[in-house]
Image (cartoon, grey):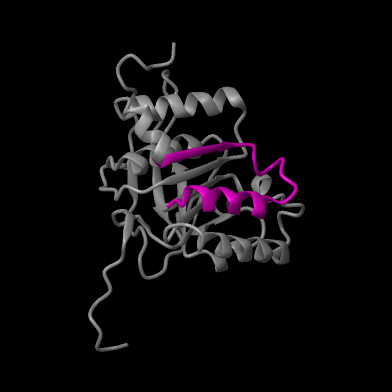
Amino acid sequence: ILTRAPIVPAWIVQDMLPRGTLVILAGAAGAGKSTLCYCLAYAVATGAPFLGLPTVPTRVLYFDEENGEPDWLQYNQWAWAGLGCPPVDYLDTTLRLEHFTLATADSWAHTMAQAVHAHHPGLIVVDTATPAFHIRDENDNAEATRCMGSLRQIRELGDNATILVLKHEKHLDESAAAQRTIRGAKAWLGGFDQVIYHVVSMGGKRRRDGTRLTQLEPGKLRAFAMRQIIHIDPSWTPGETPG
């Protein structure tokens, strides 16, 4: 082990998302987690940069169990337009969108496994954990552990897949980013490889066009993960500004 060559990880997003890992993206309601993740999904599916970082193109499977149909449709249109409207026929082969297919299924794990087996993705996004995984008690560590066991089995069906799960954040101390944590069972923190917090920046008051300054902050990380704060200053593609 000590004398072997240094490990060079396979990345989905350079220096942010390594392949084959379980990642939590946590943030307060309204921080823009879904918008961010749709931009991520379209960037990875087409090999476009994400937040200025190189991506390695791979198939993406996105489960949206949180957003109603109007928002779901709009998030997709915004992300697609923001990338310059890449060819839809290409996206048909690289990006699979599932809307309320887990929340209404008898067995979320079986339904997810079927979709992963059919699409063979390198990135799986789950938006968000509680409705997607049919969580009955958000604070039950045993229930969280069972969910993570299913996710590890499902991950093996993909192409060395990374699973990115959206969760809500809980602040222990508003003045210290180091005190950020997720809402609910703490078993999620122990079982995942990386936690990234999507937070509204200081002075990030919502602008007239609906955007605001946010940032990604690294939380829990292991050997390969995002280690630097990434500041996000969003802008609209010309002609796409609401209103």
Outermost residue, front side: 118
Q: Position of residue 110 (x, y in %)?
A: 66, 54
**Along the horizontal axis of the image, is 239 left or right of 146?**
left
Q: Residue at x 43, y 15 (%)?
A: 242
Q: Position of residue 134 (x, y in %)?
A: 72, 49
Q: Quadrant of the C terminus?
A: top left
Membership of 107 in magenta stretch = yes
Q: Nearer the viewer, residue 186 or 144?
A: 144
Quarter where residue 222 is shown: bottom left
Q: Position of residue 61 (x, y in %)?
A: 49, 45
Instruction: State which region is magenta.
Output: 94-121
151 relative to 232, above or below: below
Q: Position of residue 177 (x, y in %)?
A: 46, 54
6 relative to 104, above or below: below
Q: Nearer the viewer, residue 8 or 144?
A: 8
84 relative to 11, above or below: above
143 relative to 56, above or below: below
Q: Residue at x 42, y 61 (%)?
A: 160
